[in-house]
Image (cartoon, coloured by chain):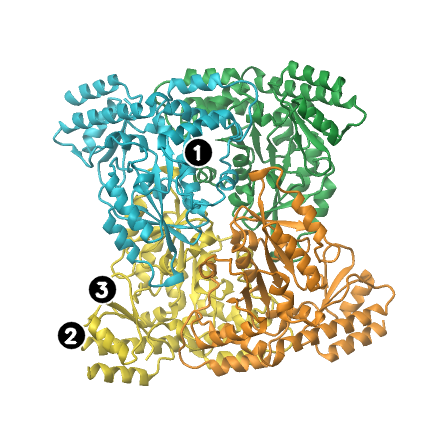
Chain colours: A yellow, B orange, C cyan, D green
């Protein structure tokens, strides 16, 4: 039973079939091919608005290129104290922006509160140009702790952000899972909620390695493509990355896969919940369960081949992650083990 | 007939089959999987020495991460005046190194001569710390103009480089084609010829997007993996990139593919050569033909659906590139058109 | 009465006299002159050990060049939540290091506690190369809140740091004031307390603009001079900056000036203390007094031409700073006003 | 006799007197003081137009901060093959811009020709975003080889530059000497000739260390001050740097000093010219003489305490530099030696 990370999951078979299908002779390079046009069109339809799209192979790249286009080197990017961009990207945003600073906002559950944005911004201004210039805010939807912003949450934050001249970025590594939980459309929690630029993740949810940057705000005029190119993130054979999106969107495959992952996490939560020594730490909105499990119990589980990861911040805190391909047998085996400790 | 770029070519069907095959359930992320171990082992065998390997999705990334590990921000990287790193990577080496300078050495055919390295180095030193510190040399094998260094050429340059405390990097975007032309083994034109670190390209020669950095020199102690991660070039599902290498190496597929591409370029050269108004500009060592073609003739060819690219530096200069999947019919059609102008 | 900042203070007249004196004809540039040799020697004597010295014109430059030599771009620099490098240098450390991250450690009074270093370091390691690499710690002596580390405090932290492979940097913008408070020698709170590299400030304490980087640890091999040069911080007429040091050290001028400033701050503290509506926020160890003063009272003071600055973090918090040239009349006038509110 | 560099020269005594004079008590920091206002006003008068001013302590800083405000990280800066920014600033422009590329234009005498700008720009565009974006041109007035652009030269180049969307920067390290040679006003060879932003050097011509950035083009909206601050180039006691400008401009001191330096260089040229084994390499427009002198003769001169520097590019090439404080006795002694070889 592998509940370590959705990064370890497999790929929709339809995607690999499709790569086989489009693997004909030569085709224009660097995104001027027809598959890429098709993918762009499908994303436009999915988001129900005019967008600009860029395909890259990692979420770190998507986040960092996006942020580098909305924050100057002497700027600051507000984000949560659990943000992936802060703790798990080895300084990539700093690298891509040329040295901008991530300004962490404390949260209790991974979700930034409007009042904490206000109080954070109050820390700036007194020393003028001696301080970095708060320039952007990055919200992770769903958050790194498996929680989800409602559209209203988002709107109140992005409104405040814009009033303070901050651009708004969304790290959507698990965007599909959030849509699923909220039973909303992609547009509802992106541009309709005031998001300027989105890192749309698909790799954790069925593709090989395809993360896209979706730009909604036309004021973002930065020479994106050159930033992409000079970061080594422009694929020559772009059709093999954009082609993944085609099959990801087709037949609502993306949302069904996210639903499946979310369901399996709920199942795990319910199983863990039955044990009175275990504390579920955060609401389980998507495909992740954070649980405090006594050390001894953790050892027993591992001996029984139940794999999960320790997590930061508290003793005994663990993370269980499911994916679109977490199968029912894994869950059943896990339930059996938990019932027979 | 598409002779524009080997970047537009397709992928070995065996690779896509293999991705399908390994697309089972979950597998450890970030390169700790078994496919990656297998690929590492096959590369070690191919190069006949102990190596350190990193997989990235573009040649620009491979070159830049490699260079950033052997040149400080205040350093200089010697390279040819036609180097891809200088003209076609939108400043990526400068970005990754934190501002190092590319020092161009003039060449007549894309190949750096030892004496020009000597004379270039003479331009440094007089002003001490007011100058950047020459720290590395990057050689492209085969060169951007389709020419190839012999092992002796390489050795004489790398020996000089080391005497001057320069690390030696090879941009091997078309390394396979060079091996093919020289009828040599990978080791012969890499570490045995004094190369410290190699960007081994495979994308132009049959993979989807798989470029590897191969480190030979154990003195290169830089924290490579963190540089890879913070550049967004660490794949979570690494098996789908390293898996490409497995099938690329298997059954000598890589060298056979390069041979086929080289042969087709020779065929094109021979066809062009028959026309006395056309001048073949550089020796055709690999899969590229540079030819000066009168404008009028270029127009006629394009009307006949013969696609090739203009090239820098001289009026009427053009580049024809073949690939492993350039088929004989394309060549025949091209010959027919040329014979019936 | 100006108690806003020691940055606004004047310069030892002896320094300007000396600049006049050495203003003879030409002299070798870039630090190869005799005045610079003299200054180097005097600093060596002052610190009682072999050192390497670099002169720059701002504390921001001194800190950032120092940090860039002990922390890689993918590294982290631990510092207090009040560190000048974090809040008042507009991202300079990030700029100079190529994107390293400042990791803030919470303090109650500007002084980092050993146990908080331990707990901060515990947040690193779980995610391997996905995290930045903690590489250095920067301690401000005296701290931004006017408090001072004892040699024992310093030793316990630097010992822990070294055990964890961190280099140790000291931001000594008010180093002289700390020496004064501790009645210790410069060596005691620098290399003898485990500091590898020091930014020694003199500008706030009587020079025009002369901050020096003092390197104690010979393992720091980085090409400092090139970093200095490429940052535009190498003076051509270096004698006019190093000459300031000569007169700063001569006749114990530096420590006497610091003592005077410290005394005047104590006087201010005592005056404020008499008013029961005013709370002295932090111990007054050096030339700064942090006091909570009711708004109304602040307004009255300002109307009476008493100038001081608001400070971050709490309502009504203010900062009073004295300098070597704060004269007794200013203090007396201030006392008179306070006594006659 | 020291003819090595004007960087080694002394300072106008009036400047040091003035620093003494303004060295009263405290004064607002970071440029909000009255001396700085006075200096700003005097510069505005000197340039006869509305300007924005920034004071820094080195030419490298002035050039690099200026360039970083007109060229993105993925941009290119055209400059001559002898440009100080290219060869003598240890990669500072690359550092400050975040990795932009200097594109060298060949010259025969340090002065860029319009047609060579045209041909250089022709090398860009064919490969779109794979190339850096030419964004600025930097002209050195007077050039590093002691030659001077006429206003007409400048206008023809800046017109071409603007047509190609390049900003125009002038490295005016020896701007005063050029004004002197051309008998023109500062405005004539700066904004009236199409220059957007100027690094105005004064250090080589009588100040301690004061280089200013003068911004003419109001379209340059970049947050300059934050760039200055984060580079460590914002002086706290700014009055001691801006005060240097006050006395530099007062009573035409600047132009008289430049005239004196230029005259002494002419004298040296005339002395050298008498020796038929010596070749004057470039026109002597300002305070520098480039001469090819046989090795033996060089040795004799050095034995006679005549100090000058070897120069790049040709065997036996040397550089003699005079300054405002090169005294007549030095010239006479030199003449005597040359006449009595």
Which is more foreground, mark 3 or mark 1?
A: 3
Disc 3 to disc 1: CB gap under 8 Å:
no
* Residue B1 visible, this orientation: no
Say yes or no: labels 1 and 2 on the same chain: no
Residue annotated with mark 2: A276
Q: Is residue B135 visible?
A: yes
Q: Which residue is mark 1?
A: D234
Q: Residue at x 71, y 58 (%)?
A: B111
Q: Is residue C318 left or right of residue B211?
A: left
Write the residue at 30% across / 28% down. C4
Q: Which residue is mark 3?
A: A315
Q: Chain of mark 1?
A: D
Image quarter (top left, top right, bottom left or bottom right) of the N terminus of chain D: top right
Work out whether disc 3 and disc 2 sit on a shared chain.
yes
How many discs mark residues in the rendered view? Answer: 3
Q: Quadrant of residue C173?
A: top left
Does A321 sit left or right of D222 as displayed? Answer: left
**Residue B130 position within the rendered picture, expressed as x and y whole percent measured from the top left:** 57, 38
Residue D83 lies, with reference to residue D330, above or below; the image says below
- In the rendered image, residue D104, in percent from the top left (x then y), is placed at 66, 44
Q: Nearer the viewer, residue A227 or C270?
A: C270
A150 to C334, vertically: above or below: below
Which one is in front, C166 or A60? C166
* Label 1 CA crowd tier, 10 Å (few <14, some 14–19, many 20+): many
* Spot occupied by residue C247 in the image (x, y as percentages of width and height): 40, 22
Quarter holding the C terminus of chain D is top right
């Amino acid at each position: 039973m592998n509940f370590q990370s959705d990064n370890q999951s497999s790929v929709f078979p339809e995607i690999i079939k499709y790569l086989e299908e489009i693997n004909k002779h030569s085709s224009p390079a660097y995104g001027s091919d027809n598959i890429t046009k098709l993918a762009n069109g499908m994303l436009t339809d999915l988001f129900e608005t005019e967008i600009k799209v860029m395909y890259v192979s990692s979420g770190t790249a998507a986040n960092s290129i996006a942020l580098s286009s909305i924050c100057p080197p002497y700027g600051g990017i507000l984000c949560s104290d659990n943000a992936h961009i802060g703790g798990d990207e080895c300084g990539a945003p700093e690298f891509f922006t040329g040295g901008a600073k991530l300004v962490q906002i404390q949260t209790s559950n991974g979700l930034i509160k409007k009042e904490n944005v206000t109080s954070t911004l109050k820390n700036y201004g007194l020393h003028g140009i001696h301080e970095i210039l708060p320039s952007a805010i990055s919200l992770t939807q769903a958050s790194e702790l498996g929680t989800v912003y409602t559209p209203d949450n988002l709107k109140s934050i992005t409104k405040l952000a814009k009033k303070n001249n901050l651009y708004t970025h969304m790290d959507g590594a698990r965007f599909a899972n959030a849509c699923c939980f909220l039973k909303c459309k992609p547009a509802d929690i992106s541009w309709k909620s005031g998001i300027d630029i989105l890192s749309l993740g698909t790799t954790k949810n069925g593709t090989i390695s395809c993360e896209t940057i979706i730009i909604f705000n036309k004021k973002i005029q930065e020479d994106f493509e050159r930033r992409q190119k000079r970061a080594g993130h422009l694929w020559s054979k772009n059709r093999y990355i954009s082609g993944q999106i085609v099959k990801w969107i087709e037949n609502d495959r993306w949302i069904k896969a996210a639903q499946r992952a979310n369901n399996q996490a709920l199942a795990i939560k319910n199983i863990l919940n039955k044990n009175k020594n275990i504390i579920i730490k955060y609401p389980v909105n998507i495909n992740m369960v954070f649980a405090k499990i006594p050390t001894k119990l953790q050892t027993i589980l591992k001996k029984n081949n139940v794999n999960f990861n320790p997590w930061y911040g508290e003793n005994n805190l663990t993370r269980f992650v499911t994916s679109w391909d977490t199968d029912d047998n894994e869950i059943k085996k896990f339930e059996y083990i938990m019932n027979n400790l």
